[in-house]
């Protein structure tokens, strides 16, 4: 099984700043990676798929990059509505697995 | 507008069974693969099962294999999860979600249905 190691677990940043969240796969997932945002009490929402493709309707402040085993989610110009927990997920093979999540707080 | 509405959750004793449903609308259900993902209280996301558009391909997490069965009725636009031999560790919010045409990432999610396994 492919393990997804996500870091950090918790992040505090100021409005207008940029942040990065990383996800490391235990083997090459060839870009088959998605990122989700989950706001408190809500279902997750897809942000990014295929490592860097922005889902329709997602603000361009969100971007993804990476290849092989290492991937990054970047949020630029942080907004109050970005308070959420973020998860990565690989879909290279079954079983599908998620990272453990990054909780983002605005300072 | 895509809508996925789960139902069938509740409180159930260990060892008993429960069947979840997910009613889809706003898209051509029969063209899309579907999935169940769960989230234990205060925990992260765990993929449970996936089914292709025509039910030809079905996959399960090891934690539920042999106990859970995913199925679909394209005529009724409905996805199901039959859960048997339930354990306390199956307690979670269960989401249904569609997967993207280019891979098993989850593009639309329901709001979830709670399953509590307790005596």
Image: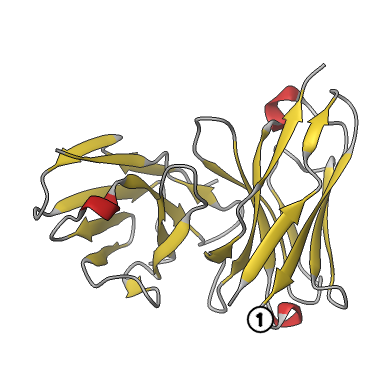
**Looking at the rendering, in which quadrant would you find the C terminus of chain B?**
top right
Residue B51 sits above or below residue B19 on the image: below
- Outermost residue to the top: B119
Q: A1 left or right of B119?
A: left
**Is residue A30 in sight in this rendering?**
no
Residue at 33% x, 61% y: name it.
A68
- Residue under numbered circle 1: B27
Give me the chain letter of mark 1: B
**Is residue B61 in sight in this rendering?**
yes
Q: Residue B33: horizontal and vertical position, in percent? A: 68, 71
Residue at 44% x, 63% y: name it.
A46
Residue at 27% x, 34% y: name it.
A10
Q: How is the image coloured?
A: secondary structure
Q: Residue B87: horizontal and vertical position, in percent? A: 78, 26
**Looking at the rendering, in which quadrant would you find the N terminus of chain B?**
bottom right
Disc 1 element: loop
The part of the image, by quadrant, that contains residue A107 is top left
In this orientation, which residue lies closer to the viewer: B87 or B5?
B5
In this orientation, which residue lies closer to the viewer: A57 or B61?
A57
Residue A61 sits above or below residue A13 on the image: below
- Tell me if mark 1 has few (under 14), some (14-19) or many (20+) residues whose alpha carbon lies within 10 angstroms of its own: few
In this orientation, which residue lies closer to the viewer: A46 or A2?
A46
Q: Residue A72: horizontal and vertical position, in percent? A: 25, 56
- Outermost residue to the right: B16
Q: Residue A35: horizontal and vertical position, in percent? A: 39, 58
Residue B89 sits above or below residue B72 on the image: above
The part of the image, by quadrant, that contains residue B108 is bottom right
């Amino acid at each position: 099984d492919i393990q997804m190691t996500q870091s950090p677990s918790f992040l505090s940043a100021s409005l207008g700043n940029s942040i990065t969240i990383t996800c490391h796969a235990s083997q090459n997932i060839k870009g088959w990676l998605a990122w989700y945002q989950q706001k408190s009490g809500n279902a997750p929402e897809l942000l990014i798929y295929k490592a860097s493709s922005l889902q329709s309707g997602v603000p361009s402040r969100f971007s993804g990059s990476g290849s092989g085993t290492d991937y990054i989610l970047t949020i630029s110009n942080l907004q109050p509505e970005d308070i959420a927990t973020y998860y990565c997920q690989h879909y290279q093979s079954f079983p599908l697995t998620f990272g453990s999540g990054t909780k983002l707080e605005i300072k | 507008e895509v809508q996925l509405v789960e139902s069938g959750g509740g409180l159930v004793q260990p060892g008993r069974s429960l069947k979840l449903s997910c009613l889809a609308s706003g898209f051509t259900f029969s063209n899309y693969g579907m999935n169940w993902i769960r989230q234990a209280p205060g925990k992260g996301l765990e993929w449970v099962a996936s089914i292709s558009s025509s039910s030809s391909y079905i996959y399960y997490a090891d934690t539920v294999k042999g106990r859970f069965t995913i199925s679909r009725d394209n005529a009724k636009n409905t996805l199901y999860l039959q859960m048997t031999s339930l354990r306390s560790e199956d307690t979670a919010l269960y989401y249904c979600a569609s997967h993207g045409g280019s891979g098993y990432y989850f593009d639309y999610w329901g709001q979830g249905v709670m399953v509590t396994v307790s005596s």
